[in-house]
Image (spheres, rainbow, N blue to C red):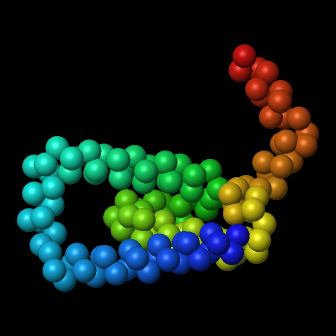
Amino acid sequence: MKIAKILSFMGIMAMTAVLIYGFTKGDFFEDGGELMKNPWGIVSLVDLYVGFTLFSIWMALREKNIPVLILWIAAVMILGFFAASVYVFINLMTSRGDILRFFLGDRKEEILLKERSGERGADHERKR
């Protein structure tokens, strides 16, 4: 998990640098308009927001606190992978090396309990 912490921290630093660069050297609305005129600009934005949405689904699966979840999703949709890198870094630090805690968050015990009790298998069988 040390490598993941380093990579997420590098993501924070890289995104901080490029956000500062973009806001100081570019015109958000003018450049955004140019991006929307380019077919590959549209493809890139759709790709980006599909990624944001998938990342948000993972956050929703691991977060129990709905107001906190809403704030994080808003941050990701507005600040992009800067916010996602911060979210990953914080959760890597607070999981203390527990990979299941990192991926499942506050729902770890709930999910493991269901797994152990066979609920997941029973639910899976009912869906068939």
User: In the image, 43: left or right of 73?
Assistant: left
Q: Residue at x 26, y 45 (%)?
A: 43
Give coordinates of residue 27: x percent, y percent: 12, 72
Residue that extends furthest to the front in the rendered view of this protein: 3
Left-right relation of 1 to 86:
right
Image vertical order of residue 107 relative to residue 82, above or below: above
Which residue is located at x 76 percent, y 26 percent?
A: 124
Residue 40 in the image: x percent, y percent?
21, 47
In the image shown, does 31 or 107 lie closer to the viewer?
31
Give 66 or 123, whichever is nearer the viewer: 123
All told, the count of numbered labels is: 0
Vertical order, 47 against 74 (above or below): above
Name the quarter where the C terminus is drawn. top right
Inspect this view and state whether residue 25 appears: yes
Residue depicted at x 85% and y 42%:
115
- Image point (71%, 20%), residue name: 127
Q: Residue most toward the top?
A: 128
Residue 61's place in the image compared with 117, above or below, is: below
Q: Position of residue 107 (x, y in %)?
A: 73, 55
> Left of 12 or right of it: where is 124?
right
Q: Where does the N terminus fall, quadrant-wise?
A: bottom right
Residue 67 shows up from this direction: no
